[in-house]
Amino acid sequence: MTASLLEVDQQRVHFTLPGDGLIWPGKKTLKAVDGISFTLKPGETLGVVGESGCGKSTLARGILGLVPVTSGSIKLNGVELTELSRRDMREQRRTMQVVFQDPLASLNPRMTVGEIIAEPLKVYNPEMSSKDLKQQVVSMMDRVGLLPNLINRYPHEFSGGQCQRIGIARALILKPKLLICDEPVSALDVSIQAQIINLLMELQQEFGLAMVFIAHDLSVVKHISHRVMVMYLGKVVEMATREELYKNPKHPYTRALIDSIPLPDPELERNKKINTLDGDLPSPLAPPSGCAFRTRCPKAHDRCKEAAPDLEVFENNHSVACWDPN
Amino acid sequence: MSAGNAATLESVSQQQEIKGRSLWDDAFYRLLKNKAAMVSVVILSILMILVIFAPLFSPFAFDEVDWDLISSAPDMASGHIFGTDSNGRDMFVRTLYGGRMSLMVGVLATLVSLIIGISYGATAGYIGGRTDAIMMRIVDILYAMPFMFFVILLMVFFGRNIYLIFIAIGAINWLDMARIVRGQTLSLKGKEFVEAALANGVSTPRIIFRHIVPNLLGIVVVYVTLTIPQVILVESFLSFLGLGVQEPNTSWGALVSLGAQNMENAPWVLLFPGVFLAVTLFCFNFIGDGLRDALDPKDR
Amino acid sequence: MSILEVNDLSVKFSVRDGEVAAVNKVSFELEKGEILGVVGESGSGKSQLVLSMLGLLASNGETSGSVKFDGQELIGMKPSALNQIRGDRVSMIFQDPMTCLNGYLSIAKQMTEVLTLHKGMDYKTALARSTEMLDAVKIPDAKNRIMRYPHEFSGGMRQRVMIAMSLLCKPDLLIADEPTTALDVTVQAQIIELLNDLKDDFGMSIIMITHDLGVIAGISDNVLVMYASRAVEYAPVHGLFESPNHPYTKALLRSIPRLDNTAHEDLYAIPGNPPNLLHLPEGCAFAERCDHQKEKCLEDRPLLRSVSEGRQKACHLDELP
């Protein structure tokens, strides 16, 4: 068995917000990520799925050290990240990189493509000659499918898909071991989505990357992930290998997520039994008692109100947090 | 039209590198199309050239007294095309000399406030938290000082000195700049490209000066073009009160002040510096408005 | 009888580098009670198409062609007359409901205003009717909720409020511009279900603009596929998904990640990027990305032509291999 590259154990990210009181507002705690654990092997992809507000982006930011982690441990290559000094953390950042959701917003509008891609290199190899720098940038641009003669162009001159390629080139120029993709294709058109997903899969093979791939719907994750984790209000509700999860979803929320993706086939789409969830995601500031999903769950009963179910492991390494799994 | 641009990029020949069109280029193009702003730029350029070079070619020095022609009206024959003042000095040269002083105060004091304001504001905004709170409270305290009192105090202690005016004006003006820059920085800080830089291990000073400041410059440039006329006015006001430049040196404000005293019998002494001052202020304001529209096309 | 007839509708925008042809000679008809899906990628002109019909283009846009709504020509109509039609007989919902709702006014105030303005109702009846409409879009506790402000609603609820507002005057035509794009999948499913129900209750026609073929499959009767400012295929929904006639439609269908097949093969990706609308190619705009490209495609632009009963396509190929 290969050793894990990333080990996340009981990660919690809580934010303190001012409360409602007028004169003495007090404090409210927003549990954006509430005790999430997983491991990731080199070359493996973990898909993280959940609706907006479920904490999936905060989970990623916590791993990257962009938001302070309240408690828990994050180990990268055996190094505990939560206890590192700023300087040591900077050193670790070489091995983990990130691709953001909004391709244009994640690129500095005042810098040329060449400068953007070269920046991480400059930070870690300040003595590198500008010729070497440019050569590396050009070969990386070529690798992600950008014409190298566009090196002096500015981000706003590119389409969304190309901007995402620039973002990927920047993330990969340091040859990281871990790539965290925060909804990298949500803002792209369907035909371009497929291009980017395929590109990421190719690059994963080539660089032996481990990836955390975040998305808000299960269809996108299906092609790229080895394992899939479904989140609801800061907690894992289900985690399994891709084959297992899509074939045999055990949690009613996963079931509902799968059902609500419209199928591009009028026969199937119109005849599928409608199992839409009622209502919206509850406020993470005031989560329901017991199981957080019970307010929208078609199968909720008294027990769900009283206590939250723990993540329980079934056969095939399929873990579910539900009192009454399928 | 970014999708469109992208496709042209693809079809362009593969060999040579293509020069990109930065946001500045786009803004510059929009500015070129703004007639009021362009006319102002031309007028202001002519004015600057006049102010800097014309006195060199004038037959009169700025402090030279023509005893025969005291308070004489503008007259081609005598060579005093703007007339002379009550001391018999040539108004043309004095107006241009005053312009030198006024513009210099305007530009230099603004530059001082610009450098302090940007560094201070961007640092406070980017670091945030307690540092931000302390830095901004200092600004608040400085704000609370009455400006005129501050200037008069300086004059009393150190004597009248032109450099003191730079310092006094610059020391007050950077406060506005710092506040504006801090506000902008706070909104830029949340942008994904800053997060991306952080995730890439880019150091704090580099993030501030490479990622935050260039994106602030748009609003700063606009603010600068609106600050220069403001500073010129403040200097004029100080000179009008007699706290500004010292004779025989002069500025537009000092000239207007003198002119106002003899308005009835020698209106030209007031008229020419007044017109120059007004035109300059107009031009700067038009350019500022033009720049604002050019840099932020969405707001129109 | 058709409620909407669009003929050779074109939209041009003048920009720094010339003229952008955002919509190019698009024609279609819409029957009473029909749902037309308009699909296309960003920049294909699908939004500009409907905005131009209602005279809502940005100031540098120019519309030509003809749009007949219930026999009335909308293009070139006086703004005041157009205003009468907009909101009363035709209404629109957008991707982001927050941009259309005024954050400083209560929902009740905003909804009753529409009725007092267009229908001359008094406040009390207007309020009763608004509440009824919120009930119709399944907002729980509508009576109390109506007094709230937009920011007190969640994204999905806001979109419901928008839909309720657009239905207040019982419009003949509802235009929905990507109404579910900003929503989560579970909420999207709720909204689509709602629109399907409402269509039957109100008997209106709907133009549904989206980039999601899954949404189209679930809701529309006919589909108009747009690519680079032109209509490339028009077909009844079942026909389109069973046997797409245009290579673009076919490629688009293939590139959607699907949940219903169990194989985990690679995704099909359409190569390249959409063309620049400033310099559209002489021939077929899709030719460069097309698997079946022929010499003719590069020189000669295919026009939209009938291929079988109720189906049209703009492609030189007769049969897709």
Image: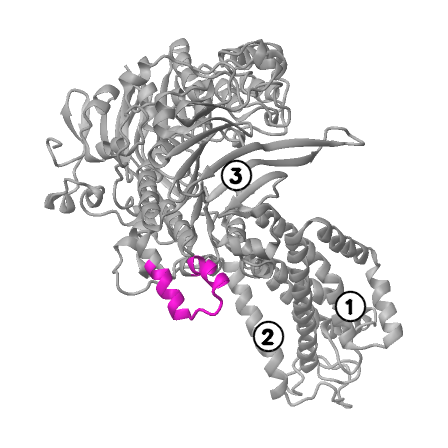
User: Where, by quadrant of the figure, is residue A275 drawn?
Assistant: top left
Mark 3 and mark 1 on one chain: no
Farthest residue in the front direction?
A1
Using the rendered image, report if marks 3 and 2 lie on a common chain.
no
The one of A208 and B181 positioned closer to us in this rendering: A208
Instruction: Inspect this view and state whether residue C174 appears.
Output: no
Q: How far across and how far down the image is residue A304, in percent?
A: 57, 14
Q: Of helix, strand and loop, which mostly describes the magenta segment? A: helix
Residue sitting nearer the eye, B222 or B198 = B198
Picture residue at 34% right of the left edge, 22% below the top:
A247
Amino acid at circle 1: Ala
Q: Which residue is mark 2?
A: B48
Q: Which residue is mark 1?
A: B168
The spot of residue C204 in percent (x, y) is 38, 15
B192 relative position to C316: left or right? right
Q: Chain of mark 3?
A: A
Q: Pointer 1: residues within 10 angstroms few (<14), some, or many (20+)?
A: some
* Disc 2 residue crowd, few under 14, some 14–19, many 20+, Cα 10 Å: some
Disc 3 marks which residue? A8
Q: Position of residue B21 (x, y in %)?
A: 40, 59
Which of discs 3 and 1 lies nearer the camera? The answer is: 3
